[in-house]
Image (spheres, rainbow, N blue to C red):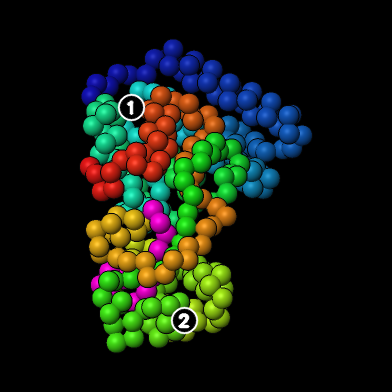
Amino acid sequence: MIFRPATKSDGADLRSRSATRRGHSRRLEEQLGLTLFIRRNRILELTREAQDYLPSIRSAVADLHRATARLRRTDHEGRLTVSTIASLATKWLVSRVAAFQDANPGIEVRITTSTHLVDFQREEVDIAVRYGHGTWSGLRAHWLMAEQIFPVCSPELLHDARPLCAPEDLAHHTLLHTTVSREDWQLWLTAAGLPASIATRRGMTFDQGFMAIQAAMEGLGVAMGRFHLVEADIAAGRLVAPFDMVLPRDAGYYVISPEATADAPKIARFRDWLIASATPGALAVGAG
């Protein structure tokens, strides 16, 4: 590091920048019609109004920086960050994404999971898959796939001391719930003509759907399966659907991204591939 003595030109430069800052602060006060600074000699202190105003200003500036950084890196970085819920990532997306990587070696896919709706301005996420009705402000949503729910269990429960032969037999078995979709059992039981109170009896509850599915495979009880999360396990014989009744949901999975970046090449490429991969028969279950 090299130090040099201050010169007259340095002092002039500091005075010029100080005058510029004073000019900016006065113009801001004029625009707002408020006094934001208390001026004492060469010291500026914030008024109470300015102190209340400052956190919002800092947040807005930070959002602007993040949005600008995102816009600049979208086309130049090879990484694509995808967010979804843990169950869908574990039971559906991970088994398919290798096919996209093989076809697009220049794009590194990073999968992250969460249960909340992604805040694209604050989180390092490019595209997400979420369950809902497709109406999210400021986001472009593309339909991915519908969802159906139905009971699933280990094949061993079909030959239990109290086998599952009819929906009424569920009253004698442990029901496996998830905290985010606890109403699924009540909806299915009602549609099957059974009292919803069966769902309120003692059972087991998990905070993630894939954990309930794993518990069902271990023979701990009967879980409410979502088709796209259990299709591979049913095909492999690890799970069975003991009843024919399937309950369609009025919502589904959507691929979402901010309007400002939805047409970026890597985002559009992954979205188009994902939608195509959800078409029945497009990819072999468990491939990759």
Q: Which of marks 1 and 2 is nearer the N terminus?
A: 1
The kind of residue on which mark 2 rests is Glu
Distance from the alpha carbon under mark 1 to that under mark 2 = 55 Å
Q: Which residue is nearer to you in this view: 36 or 179?
A: 179
Q: Residue at x 33, y 46 (%)?
A: 93
Instruction: Look at the image and tell me in which quarter the C terminus lies.
Output: top left
Query: On screen, 214 above or below 131?
Result: below
Estimate the x, y position of residue 211 in percent, counting from the top left.
33, 66
Residue at mark 2: 168
**Secondary structure beneath disc 2?**
helix
Quarter containing the N terminus: top left
Residue labelled with disc 1? 77
Q: Which of 211 and 1 is in front in this view?
A: 211
Q: Is residue 58 at all visible to an observer of this figure?
A: no
**Region of the chain picked out in magenta, as a range:** 216-228
User: For mark 2, does the 10 Å Cα neighbourhood hold few (<14), some (14 to 19), or many (20 or more) residues?
Assistant: some
Question: Where's residue 105, x and y in %?
Answer: 24, 28
Q: How crowded is mark 1: few (under 14 residues within 10 Å), some or many (20 or more)?
A: few
User: From what the image shows, is residue 138 above or below residue 202?
Assistant: above
Q: Quadrant of residue 9?
A: top left
Asked if residue 279 shows in the view, the reply is yes
Q: Which image quarter: residue 72?
A: top left
x 54%, y 57%: residue: 249
Residue 174: x and y, percent? 38, 81
Magenta region includes residue 73? no
User: Which amino acid, mark 1?
Assistant: Glu
Task: Name the residue nearer the viewer: 7 or 287.
Answer: 287
